Amino acid sequence: MKRERVDPPYKVYALRPNGTRRPLDAHGIVVELRPGIEVEIDYAPHPNFAGQLVMQTPPSPRMKRLYAEGNVDDFAVLFGGSNVLHVWVERRRRQPQTAKRPASKRKRND
């Protein structure tokens, strides 16, 4: 099933060291914050999220596999001012789920 997306995607640019912009032809990018920790930024989100910046971690193609391995990546956010947002990813290990034991039938002393 094809993903429904905003079309055309948002205009995005690569910034050169001198501040000039170079247009990019992309529906999104993946940023590696550190080895194994990545954030996907979607430039063509679902129409319900048009006008919003959609980020997910881990990137959707890897999400199912990482979760099956017991890894859970969470965003942490710090507001640096009214126009600055700091985002990082914290990885935690999910405890393996154990089978539920049936409730014990204890005798009641009435």
Image: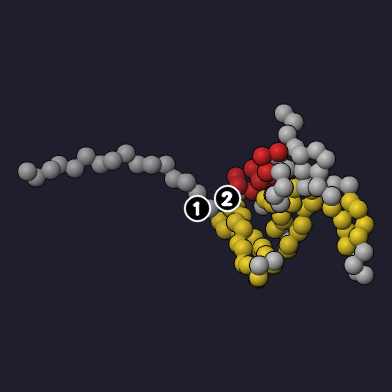
- 10 Å neighbourhood of mark 1: few (<14), some, or many (≥20)? few
Q: In terms of secondary structure, where does tag 1 sit?
A: loop
Q: In terms of secondary structure, where does tag 2 sit?
A: loop
Q: Does 46 sit left or right of 100 as displayed? A: right
Question: Which residue is at a point 66% across and 39% down the rendered structure image?
Answer: 48
- Provide residue 61's location: percent of width, then percent of height: 72, 43
Question: Which residue is at a point 50% across and 52% down the rendered structure image?
Answer: 95
Query: Which one is in front, 14 or 59?
Result: 14
- 10 Å neighbourhood of mark 2: few (<14), some, or many (≥20)? few
Q: Amino acid at mark 2?
A: Gly
Say if mark 1 contacts mark 2, CB within 8 Å. yes
Query: Which one is in front, 84 or 32?
Result: 84
Question: Which residue is at a point 60% across and 45% down the rendered structure image?
Answer: 68
Q: Does 76 sit left or right of 2 as displayed? A: left
In space, the residues marked 1 and 2 are separated at their CA atoms by 7 Å
**Looking at the figure, which quarter contains the N terminus?**
top right
Q: Which mark is residue 31?
A: none
Q: Does 5 sit left or right of 87 as displayed? A: right
Question: Which residue is at a point 9% across and 45% down the rendered structure image?
Answer: 109
Q: Which mark is residue 95?
A: 1
- Provide residue 77's location: percent of width, then percent of height: 62, 63
Colour mode? secondary structure
Vertically, is 58 above or below 104? Answer: below
Q: Which residue is mark 2?
A: 70
- Provide residue 66's location: percent of width, then percent of height: 64, 48
Q: Amino acid at mark 1?
A: Gln
- Provide residue 6's location: percent of width, then percent of height: 76, 39
Residue 4 location, quadrant:
top right
